[in-house]
Image (tube, rainbow, N blue to C red):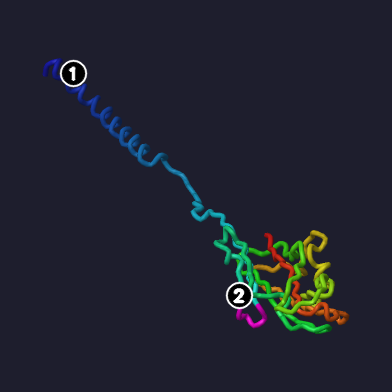
Amino acid sequence: MSTKLRTSALKRIRFAPVALLAGIFAAVLLSLSLTGTLSGFAASITNNANSAATGTLVMQEQNAGATVTCLSTDGGSVSTNAATCSTINKFGGSTTMTPGNTVNTAISIKNTGTANAATFTLTPGATCTQSANGTQNGTATDLCAKMNLVITSGSTTVFSGTLASFKGAAASAFTMPQAPAAGASVPFNFAVTLDPSAGNTYQGLAASVPMTWTFTA
């Protein structure tokens, strides 16, 4: 055998393991590129329910028989959340009161929203308005001072005095005995009495004071 043939055979023998090693190395590199690691432990947690949402604060007013309902959203959407309720007269709406006569009106204020109320107040209007009731009217001009009002919530007296002293209430709101949680109601009773000393000059007259209930959260 010639020297050239022996040299070629030896080169092929030496090249075979080198090629085999190169193939193995390439396979390892390919495995690393696919898995990112040779081996080891891994653990993970994915939080897929991360959210925060706002509640609602909605006021409901009802008369004693629950036949009339007013909602704070009656003035629009919850974005407005302020309404005027003219269908529940806190002073009873009587047009035939006589001296010493008392008219009671029971109502409830409920939090129909999903958020608890932090504060609950009642703010009287700035004025007590006297007007004529019917066509025959007395000449007195201070009926507001002759109409007595007592507001109670359970055993708590919220206010006791004349309509003249109730209006404006020294420009401050009355804090109610409890701020209702979501779904809870607070009962109230309004007792209006025409002073026994009222004489003929107080006949055929009416007095009114607006008021505003407010929740905050």
Mark 2 vs mark 1: give the one in front.
Answer: 2
Q: Work out whether 37 lies above or below 118.
A: above
Q: CA distance from mark 2 to mark 1?
A: 109 Å
Instruction: Say which residue appears at 70% left-offset and 65% top-offset.
Output: 212
Instruction: Say which residue appears at 75% left-offset and 75% top-offset.
Output: 206
Q: Which residue is mark 2?
A: 69
Q: Secondary structure at mark 1?
A: helix
Q: Residues within 10 Å of mark 1 (few under 14, many from 20)?
A: few
Confirm whether the magenta stretch covers residue 189.
no
**Relative to the observer, which residue lies in front, 129 or 217?**
129
Q: Residue furthest top?
A: 3
Please tell me in which quadrant of the rendered image residue 111 appears: bottom right
Residue 74's x, y, as percent?
A: 57, 67
The kind of secondary structure the magenta stretch mainly shows is loop
Q: Residues within 10 Å of mark 2 (few under 14, many from 20)?
A: some
Q: Which mark is residue 7?
A: 1
Q: Which residues are magenta?
A: 63-69
Question: Is 46 situated left or right of 170 in this image?
Answer: left
Q: Does label 2 or label 1 sit earlier along the sequence?
A: 1
User: Is residue 126 visible to us here?
Assistant: yes
Mark 2 touches mark 1? (CB < 8 Å): no
Instruction: Say which residue appears at 72% left-offset and 66% top-offset.
Output: 211
Residue 45's x, y, as percent?
A: 50, 51
Question: Is 178 situated left or right of 73 in this image?
Answer: right
Question: Is 184 situated left or right of 149 in this image?
Answer: left
Residue 4's x, y, as percent?
A: 14, 16
Instruction: Say which residue appears at 20% left-offset and 25% top-offset.
Output: 12
Q: Work out whether 201 lies above or below 125.
A: below
Q: Secondary structure at mark 2?
A: strand
